Image (tube, rainbow, N blue to C red):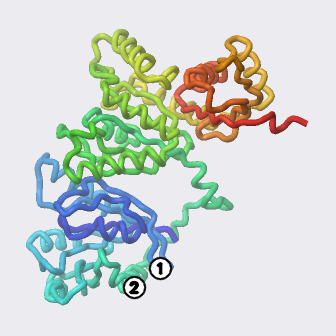
Amino acid sequence: MSFTVAIVGRPNVGKSTLFNRLVGRRLALVAEEPGVTRDRREGEARLYDLEFTAVDTAGLEEADDESLEARMSAQTERAVAETDLALFLIDARAGVTALDRHFANWLRKGPTAVVLVANKCESRAGEAGRLDAFSLGLGEAIPISAEHGEGLSDLHEAIKSHLAALPDMDDEEPGASDGEAEERVLQLAIVGRPNVGKSTLVNRLVGEERVLTGPEAGITRDAIAVQWSYEGRRIRLIDTAGLRRKAKAVKKLEKLSVADTRRAIDFAQVVVLLVEAEAAMEKQDLTIARQVMNEGRALLVAINKWDTCEDREGALKRLRDRLERSFSQGRGIPVVPISALTGQNLERLLRAVFTAYDVWNQRVATSELNRWLAGMIQRHPPPAPAGRRIKLRYMTQAKTRPPTFVLFCSKPKDLPDSYLRYLENALREDFGLPGTPIRITLRKGENPYAG
């Protein structure tokens, strides 16, 4: 049975700590300051024999205007409305607060089943608060310690008792193994500097206000994954926090956000670097692009706010010149001008994403590769240090994702980087490998496949 459990409560009661405990890894950012979580974050959770989708939410706060807090609460309310069960957390050591009572009343009026959970019950200090929670009208509070993993067996029984009322919603395709299902999902990360429109782009793509947006810079803190489908293609779309220069990322929470974004890049397959039309490919943009390519991910650049750009031809030229001049791997990287706000060119962007993914998976036949290598040597022979020319004997593609080649030669240590760049650039151009990193590994020896 497939079901969803949302973890809700006021700020700083331990929701993200419990979420991380249930999914078995530190997916959600955790810090001592309140209000760290702002968006809904989903993860595959396991609690003994129960497997379900857990949803971490922003702290519930009273707000009825257009403030950031109000938009965060709206995200949480939407999560509760779409879930099968809500775990309502209170801080047992702090006792029941007026805010707890306010949101307990709201949860009681809704259709979603609620389990009351008293967190931070690892000592007797939380017992009075747990008993006081009876006054919330949601039954007996389950005592747990999310930080120390205590009380999870009682939580398991409480969740299991609600399953009988849930419909069977097993949505896996018949005959599809977990590995096959995972393979079909394209991992797509949206990265860039703060406030360039990453969250707006994600919302426009999925067609709903799935992640928080607003005029405030740096709203997104976690890397938020959204399961989505486009024309039958399953996509795991990842919104990320803005990447600043290291010198500016001084606060602990900001450092955690940056680390989370870098992890998202590590696990992505294709990365869209979002830049602004009027300030495209600044130094930090180039730094991000290098990081993506160094991690071996397919890269394309999307120029946002194209609808407000006055000198479009000049903006495109400046960006391409900057890429090729300042970034050795930047030749041929796809560049797509878009407007996340209006949806301009988003279909074109997605076609470029699918093409980049295919290129990232491309394989070149060994016979074709060695005919190409012979031509490259004839056109520009390798150097001859100390009067003895380096012999390039054989080349084969070892793997894809990204395309990785092994070159057998007589003196691997003496072959200069400039010659490897010559081969890499030619591989990219001759075999149609734009926007994807290329790896060339040198080995010493004869042709390993010669008879």
Q: Is 391 drawn above or below residue 379 in the view shown?
A: below
Looking at the image, can residue 432 be seen?
A: no
Q: Residue furthest left?
A: 98
The residue pinned by badge 2 equals 153
Q: Residue at x 42, y 20 (%)?
A: 323
Q: Which mark is residue 305?
A: none
The residue pinned by badge 1 equals 48
Q: Residue at x 58, y 32 (%)?
A: 438
Q: Nearer the viewer, residue 216 or 421?
A: 421
Tell me where residue 321 sits by quadrant: top left
Contact, mark 2 vs mark 1 (Cβ under 8 Å): yes
Q: Position of residue 155 (x, y in %)?
A: 36, 81
Q: Position of residue 228 (x, y in %)?
A: 46, 47
Q: Residue at x 34, y 10 (%)?
A: 314
- What residue type is disc 2 on? Ser
Q: Is 135 drawn above or below residue 221 in the view shown?
A: below
| Label 1 environment density (alpha carbons within 10 Å; few <14, some 14–19, many ≥20) | few
Tell me where residue 369 sits by quadrant: top right
| Label 2 environment density (alpha carbons within 10 Å; few <14, some 14–19, many ≥20) | some
Looking at the image, can residue 241 be seen?
A: yes
Which comes sooner in the sequence, label 2 or label 1? 1
- What residue type is disc 1 on? Tyr
Q: Residue furthest right?
A: 451
Q: Nearer the viewer, residue 213 or 381?
A: 381
**In the visual, does 430 lie left or right of 328?**
right
* SS assignment at label 2: helix
**In the visual, does 423 lie left or right of 24?**
right
